[in-house]
Amino acid sequence: MSENKKDHNNEHKTTDHKHTEHNATEQGTAEKGAAEQGVSEQRAKDMQGLGFSTRAVHAGQEFDPITGAVIPPLHMSTTYHPHSVGNLRLGYDYSRGTNPTRDNWQEQIAALEGGAYGISFASGLGAEDAIIRSLLSPRDRIVMGNDVYGGTHRLIDKIHGPNGIRHTPVDMTDTAAAVQAIREDATAMVWIETPSNPLMKIADIEALTAAGHEAGAIVVVDNTFASPYLQSPLALGADLVVHSTTKYLGGHSDVVGGAVVTNSEELADKVRFIQFAAGNQSSPFDAYMTTRGAKTLAVRMERHCDNAEAVVKWLRGRKEVTKVLYPGLADHPGHHVAARQMKRFGGMVSFRLAGGADAARAVAESTELFRLAESLGGIESLMNYPAEMTHASVKGTELEVPDDLLRLSVGIEDAEDLIADLEQAFARL
């Protein structure tokens, strides 16, 4: 045998050996990945027996198995190298559909809401749109509160309305009237927002959910104002919970996002398909930022609530104020329902001024710590004039907001400083 032929045979044997090693490695990696996935699913189930803050810190936050990094890394890659054609690594192929950082956040938000499936989106309205597009058909009807967030009304009325989705606004605080509206005309979806934005109305989630299910409707609860720390709609029977995670969950006014949580695999699959096919998912960076914010939700919400209660007490003593809207007040129409379904009463406060629109605008433009801005739920306090800001789009409709009303998102600063800021603004009236 020639030297060249021997070398060729030896190279062939070496190559075969490398292929065998490579295939064994692939098989071992796949088996390891499947095992880790099983452990992750079991850990997610185990999380439900832990306290809220423990879930907030640990759900979806396994240490990195390669480096041991306590905080999971941010995965910015748009695409993933498979073991071989059709043999993906833990199911990852392209980040529009699957991304480890987004998966971590989705596991975390599901754990916080006590749900089985979390689906995250680029915005709260994106999450709402995915629910409507995936679960409703032309001629279906939504029964919703008559003071829902202006963007929700605009989405349903202006975007989905022309495509055949009908809606009926109703006072959700009047449970009997709401139940009657749900029973009429084959309701397909009940949309509950509680506390409502910005009138702070309280809807009885359990009663309305029961009525919705009796009518064969899907029940959605917007839990943005309360946050999962204060209210658990799935435990009260709701089918889906929707959030603008931009608000309390992110908590720092630096990342826009939305999320849907459910215990129904069927509903989750339908909503998740829109997330994937329509390309409205949260980016890896946004998911990472929201995860970081959500870990401190419990401690932040306690401070938001403490400060809101102090501000409410101050507002109640002011002659310039005709009405304070806060469910923690014993004389609030929804106080007893709120006390039953919420842990505390939240950091959002609305109030009306005797001086009308001029007084409201003057106060809104005079505060310094309370920054005049849209949005809510951040660590900093915000002042909002809904009639011309967040709810300008519903002017002239049944959802129009009084022009003497201001909405406060009470932050985590020192309460005395926030009250002093309001004091100096009121002094200018």
Image: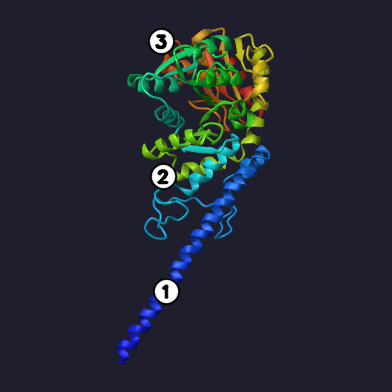
Q: Is residue 223 left or right of residue 92?
A: right
Closest to the observer, 234 or 283: 234
Comes first in the chain, label 3 or label 1 = 1
Q: Is residue 3 left or right of residue 167?
A: left
Above/below status of 51 relative to 241: below
Closest to the observer, 293 or 28: 28
Q: Is residue 121 left or right of residue 63?
A: left
Q: Amino acid at mark 1?
A: Lys
The structure's colour scheme is rainbow
What separation in Å lies between label 3 and label 1 (alpha carbons)?
74 Å
Residue 400, given in percent of the width and then of the height, sits at: 46, 12
Residue at the image point whose x is 56% and y is 58% from the top: 65
Comes first in the chain, label 3 or label 2 = 2
Dot 1: element: helix
- Depth check, mark 3 against mark 1: the one in front is 1
Q: Amino acid at mark 3?
A: Gly
Residue 95, given in percent of the width and then of the height, sits at: 41, 47
- Depth check, mark 3 against mark 2: the one in front is 2
Comes first in the chain, label 2 or label 1 = 1
In this figure, which residue is indicated by the disc labeled 1?
Answer: 18
Residue 304, given in percent of the width and then of the height, sits at: 63, 29
Report the disc number at residue 97. 2
Q: Is the C-beta separation of discs 2 and 1 under 8 Å?
A: no
In this figure, which residue is indicated by the disc labeled 3?
Answer: 396
- Mark 1 Cα within 10 Å, few/some/many (few <14, many 20+)? few
